[in-house]
Amino acid sequence: MIQHIVVFSVKSWFLFITKTKIWIQNKLPKLNKFFKKKENNGTDSRKISFVERAIIESKIKIKKVKEKIKQEHEEELKNVEEEMKEQEEKVDKIV
């Protein structure tokens, strides 16, 4: 029973707000124009917060570290492969 009352009141509230907005748009255009959001001429209205900026910077740093580790790992693999080839050449010379 309480759930029905809550749903009915929320539904009524949204209908009232919607009807009021439509009425203001039609009957009072100057008032409607006063409450409209102003455009920023193509600029981004969303500003990055300090926390979001810190997260983005951290992700970039992590990505750089991963790339650096990958490059070091690839260089180590190349060095190991070269050493193996040298060892094989020595073995071939002995045989």
Image (cartoon, rainbow, N blue to C red):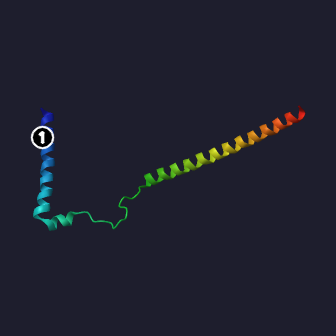
Q: Nearer the viewer, residue 16 or 2?
A: 16
Name the image quarter holding residue 49: bottom left
* Quadrant including the N terminus: top left
Name the image quarter holding residue 27: bottom left
**Picture coordinates of residue 16, whole percent (x, y):** 12, 50
Q: Is residue 3 above or below residue 28?
A: above
**Picture coordinates of residue 79, whole percent (x, y):** 74, 42
65 left or right of 75 in image: left
Name the image quarter holding residue 85: top right
Residue found at x 37% / y 65%: 43
Residue found at x 13% / y 35%: 4
Identity, as a three-letter code, of the amino acid under mark 1: Phe
- Secondary structure of the residue carrying tag 1 is helix
75 left or right of 34 in image: right
76 left or right of 2 in image: right
Residue at mark 1: 8
Q: Is residue 32 above or below residue 74?
A: below
Residue found at x 53% / y 51%: 60
